[in-house]
Image: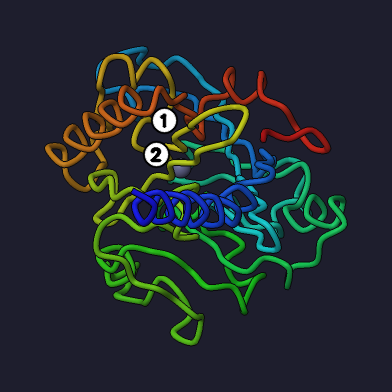
Amino acid sequence: MRLAYLIAIAALAAALLGLQPAAAAGVDKLYVLDCGHIYATDQSRWSPGVNVGVPIELSDNCYLIQHGQDWFLWDTGLADVLATQPDGVKAAGGALLVKRTKTLMAQIEALALKPTDIKSIGISHTHPDHIGNVEEFPQAMLYVQKAEYEWPGEDGKPRFKPEHPVTKLEGDHDVFGDGSVVIISTPGHTPGHQSLLVRLPHTGAVVLSGDAAHFQDNWDNRRVPPFNFNKEESLASMQRIADILAKEHAELWINHDKPQTDAQRKPPEFYD
Ligand SMILES: [Zn+2]
């Protein structure tokens, strides 16, 4: 009896000790940063046959996450140099107008951070409205799916500088090893598109879905843009995200959904 009692006490003590680092770990802050604005004359480029000829404005967000001493950046938005062109620049053969009203660097500085404080970056995919500033952080570990990294760019060029530190993923990845920030493989929009599950202590779980859907109506109706890399994978990834939302009781944060973005907290406010 006495031995069993001692073993039970020891197990309880070990469990309590084990809990201490876990309680100190986890996400401290999540900031939603303004990483550009996209204006389209015809939103049906994302919703085939629906709202043809109807213009739309999309948000373009980056998300900065503090985890203890580490800062993790999810997506880097349109290139900061765009901010020098207040009227914006035409893209996609004139179908889009892209703008930046403030730079990512200025927003990072406003939080009293330096670019070298950003220890790692995850990108949802390699379209230019998501990777525009990766090379502003040459020291940051880049988390990208192998399939995306090796997907040839225009003229067969590599999508990233070969010298940039990279972890090529083949599936999901728990960034800090404590389940607080988990990269979720959601291919389809591009070969190695990925999303991010963030378990916030007070807000609860959120899924940053990248471009798995571009706005709420497309998510609700499971619409796949015609230019996606793979339609079946796109649909399967949306279902996978829906399953995670249900299991985690998580909110879906759609990067390009302007009404949703407008309603979210902006720095210096944050989510925790
Ligand atoms: Zn995008």
At 36% from the left edge and 30% from the top edge, which residue is drawn?
213
Q: Residue furthest front?
A: 1
Q: Nearer the viewer, residue 125 or 127?
A: 125
In the displayed structure, does residue 85 sit left or right of residue 43?
right
**Amino acid residing under circle 2:** Asp
Q: Position of residue 134 (x, y in %)?
A: 57, 66
Q: Position of residue 234 (x, y in %)?
A: 21, 38
Q: CA distance from mark 1 to mark 2?
A: 5 Å
Q: Name above or below for residue 51 compared with residue 35.
A: above
In the displayed structure, does residue 110 sit left or right of residue 253?
right
Q: Name above or below for residue 177 compared with residue 227.
A: below
Residue receiving disc 1: 214
Residue receiving disc 2: 211
Q: Which mark is residue 169?
A: none
Tell me the quarter of the picture where residue 114 sits.
bottom right
In the displayed structure, does residue 100 sit left or right of residue 149?
right
**Amino acid residing under circle 1:** His
At 31% from the left edge and 22% from the top edge, which residue is drawn?
246
For mark 1, give the secondary structure. Answer: loop
Disc 1: residue Cβ within 8 A of ligand 1's nearest atom: yes
Q: Residues within 10 Å of mark 1 (few under 14, many from 20)?
A: many
Q: Nearer the viewer, residue 19 or 46?
A: 19
In the displayed structure, does residue 13 sit left or right of residue 133?
left
At 52% from the left edge and 59% from the top edge, which residue is drawn?
131
Q: Position of residue 133 (x, y in %)?
A: 61, 62
